[in-house]
Amino acid sequence: MVTLDQETIPKSIIADVMPLAGIAPEPPFFPVSVTKFVVLSVVTLGLYEFYWFDRNWRRIKDRERTNISPAIRTIFAYFYCYQCVGRVRDYDVPGLGATKLAAGPLAIGWIVTSLLWKLPDPYWWITLFSFVFLIPVQVRINRINTTVSPNHDQNNRFSAWNWAVIVIGGILVALAVMGTLIPDEEDNAPENTVLEGVENEVGEAKIACDKEVGLCS
């Protein structure tokens, strides 16, 4: 039987098969707590969800060693959403159990809800809840990451930049909500103009009538 020592095996193969002792494996997907994911999604009006896609595609690219472009797949997230969620669904982790992640319905729900921003006031606010369809995906991701890399950073704390985004974004969201709920004075302008026109016509008719009565007397 032929035996090979480590000197005769290419180093690249050794690196793939034998991870260095003491170094924990990287989480397969982007780690973030559900609370942080929801808060940042709301205050950024859904922009954080695209950042979420970018972070996950970068980890997928590194793990699978493919030449995919995370930036392109993030920009066109509507077309690649299902593939990303499908990667999470199909990731097999021994001991974690089979997943019931409905990649198709979740992807469709996120795409449709994200496109509702074109609706008129106040219905376009529905798009603010597009993150709901990604919550089950992140729950599954967190379970996968914890199983593969128990000591990884779970990214459940808000950094200084996060708080800055929360404050600024929260103010903008609040102003947008107020602008939607409080009626604009200009909206009543056409109605007021019509009423003023009717009153003017009535006044002019009354003056003309008075003149005619004076002439006949």
Image (cartoon, rainbow, N blue to C red):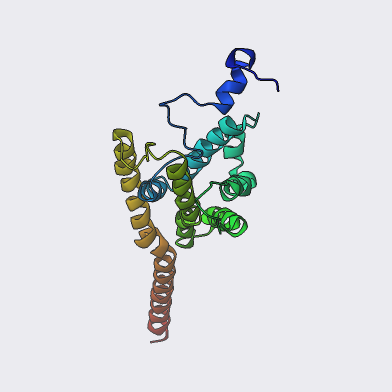
Q: Measured along the vertical axis of the image, is residue 168 above or below residue 106? A: above
Quadrant where the N terminus lies?
top right
Q: How many numbered marks have been drawn onto this rendered protein structure?
A: 0
Evaluate whether residue 176 shows in this view: yes
Image spot of residue 38 (x, y percent)? 39, 51
Residue 130: x %, y % from top left: 49, 55
* Residue 105 screen position, x and y as percent: 60, 60
Q: Image height check: is 64 above or below 10? A: below
Residue 46 seen: no
User: In the image shown, does 215 or 178 lie closer to the viewer?
Assistant: 178
Instruction: Give the residue displayed 31% in from the left and 40% down from the top.
Output: 158
Q: Splitting the image into 4 quarters, where does residue 151 fall?
A: top left
Farthest front residue in view: 1
Q: Nearer the viewer, residue 197 or 126?
A: 126
The part of the image, by quadrant, that contains residue 80 is top right
Answer above or below: position of 66 versus 205: above
63 with respect to 136 (left or right): right
* Percent position of residue 120, x then y: 51, 60
Residue 170 versus residue 116 in the image, above or below: above
Q: Quadrant of residue 146?
A: top left
Kindly give the residue lying farthest to the top in the view shown.
7
Compare residues 103 and 149 and report the one nearer the observer: 149
Residue that appears at 40% across and 47% down: 37
- Depth check: give the residue in front, 52 or 214: 52
For the C terminus, which image quadrant? Answer: bottom left
View extreme (right): residue: 1
Which residue is found at the position 37% from the left and 41% from the top? 154
